Amino acid sequence: MSEIRTLIQKKVAFYGAGSMAEAIARGLISKGVLSPTSITMMNRSNKERLQELENKYGVITVRETAAKEDVLQTTDVIVLSMKPKDAAEALRYLGPLLSPGQLVVSVIAGMTIETIQTLLGKKHPVVRTMPNTSSTIGLGATGIAFSEEVSSEEKKVVRTLFEAVGIVTIVDESTIETLTGVSGSGPAYIYYMMEALIEAGVKGGLTSEQARELTVQTVLGAAQMVQQTGESPQDLRKKVTSPNGSTEAAIGVLAKGNFKETVIAAVDRCAERSREMGNALKEEIN
């Protein structure tokens, strides 16, 4: 029996109904991994949002407390997708409702497996994930770390869930913050670079539409060149950087501005800030 067939027999509940929950649900439905009626979505009080999701995807939504408790007690996989500020209260509420056969999957930034289990009040199987916003178009990159209580079958289920919205990499939880700095926040760095390219194009006389179109295609093409050729970014860069040419002159300006070192420092700071947020959350809970 394939992983997808196994997962189709599971019920998944999203505890929190924001953009990431929607992205994952949409991916699961569009890839045929789960039927809409196998997915339940809930939030704290935004009934309009739930109705929107129900109309758009055909998922089941629950609003009343009794209905929420029933879902949380019986669903195979519960995806924690609420805002960090709401997580402590929600997890303390969830803990007593859980039974051993259920799996808890978190997409909450900064919240460690240890903190989640502490709030649940038990050493329950917990999966910590870090998707990125490209998951909304099925091109996400998700890092996954498992607690020691997660079974091999449960690991397969989680992989299938997130492979529906992009690629998956399994990591030790100690590296999740670094992964956050690289891929979790990575799209923002690329957007920032694109902003600069578009501004430079407009400054040089291109229309904003021309500059935008050329920039988007350039970034898309560069990424696909790395993916499809299998060559390293360094080798591909060298191939288009002729000695004493215009590209070399441009790279020289970036190097003079410590471009590479600045990007590395940005990733490091992002990882550091993620740890700070996680520690602050832990202290607040304690």
Image: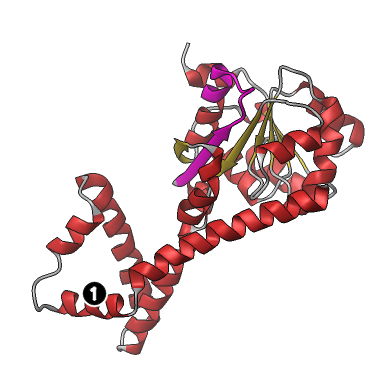
What residue sits 15% from the left and 65% below the top? 240
What residue sits 78% from the left and 21% below the top? 74
Location of residue 193 in the rendering, given as x and y in whole percent from the top left corner: 40, 71
What residue sits 34% from the left and 67% below the top? 260
Tell which of 168 and 257 is nearer to you.
257
Which stretch did the figure color magenta? 140-156
Q: Quadrant of residue 28?
A: top right
Please give the residue where the numbered disc 1 appears in the rendered image. Answer: 251
Mark 1 residue element: helix
Q: Is residue 51 left or right of residue 153?
A: right
Q: Is residue 151 magenta?
A: yes
Look at label 1 and name its amino acid.
Ile
The answer to whether residue 143 of the structure is visible from this angle is: yes
Location of residue 131 in the rendering, given as x and y in whole percent from the top left corner: 54, 46
Tell which of 16 and 241 is nearer to you.
241
189 relative to 13, above or below: below
Tell which of 77 and 55 is nearer to you.
77
Q: Is residue 226 magenta?
A: no
Q: Quadrant of residue 123?
A: top right
Q: Quadrant of residue 243?
A: bottom left
